[in-house]
Amino acid sequence: MTHINEKSVRRQLEKVRDEALHRYRATRDSLAEEVSRRNIGDALEDIDREVAATVSAGQLDADQRLIRSVDIALKRLAAGMYGICFDCRKPIPHRRLKANPLATRCLACQEETEAQSGSAHTVTPFYTEA
């Protein structure tokens, strides 16, 4: 890994993961509490509960994806592959990593991946050298 302070990156990634885990657990616990308190109520209360449950489930999913992305970045860091593009294997520019420490691709390869998949949220799994 060139031009990157490994300890600083690790601290930053661990902080992001810790915050996401805290948010995930709080949302999960809140959702579980809401489910346990369900009583027969009027239709509007039921709708409000369903909307809250849907929003909470979406937050849980987003936090799980974020935690997985941080874990991938930490594994890449430990393997000496952090900051190396998954596709072209060239260094990812420091500005890009500073803006998005979870980036697994350089901007050109990320744009190509998004154009092919039609999604801006493609996460590449951790890989090992063949």
Image (spheres, helix red, strand yellow):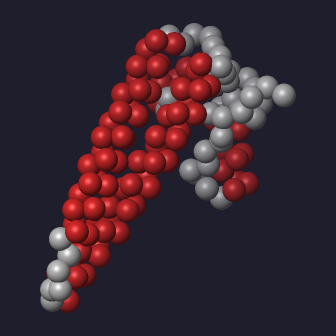
Image quarter hosting the N terminus: top right
Q: Position of residue 47 (x, y in %)?
A: 25, 81
The outermost residue toward the right is 130
**Quick check: can you spot residue 85?**
yes
From this view, report whether residue 78 is shown above or below residue 22: above
Depth check: give the residue in front, 99 or 124: 124
Depth check: give the residue in front, 50 or 39: 39
Q: What residue appears at the point 22 percent right and 62 percent down from the top-left corner?
A: 33
Q: Position of residue 113 (x, y in %)?
A: 70, 47
Q: Position of residue 4 (x, y in %)?
A: 54, 13
From this view, report whether residue 130 is shown above or below residue 47: above
Q: Give the left or right position of residue 54, taking residue 61 as reference.
A: left
Q: Give the left or right position of residue 70, taking residue 60 as reference.
A: right
Quadrant in the picture for residue 83: top right
The outermost residue toward the bottom is 43
Image quarter hosting the C terminus: top right
**Quick check: can you spot residue 83?**
no
Q: Give the left or right position of residue 16, taking residue 82 as reference.
A: left
Q: What residue appears at the point 20 percent right and 89 percent down from the top-left corner?
A: 43
Q: Give the left or right position of residue 87, taking residue 35 as reference.
A: right
Q: What residue appears at the point 61 percent right and 45 percent down from the top-left corner?
A: 123
Quadrant in the picture for residue 27: bottom left
Depth check: give the residue in front, 110 or 11: 11
Q: Position of residue 16 (x, y in %)?
A: 38, 32
Q: What residue appears at the point 45 percent right and 48 percent down from the top-left corner?
A: 64
Total numbered labels placed on residues in the image: 0
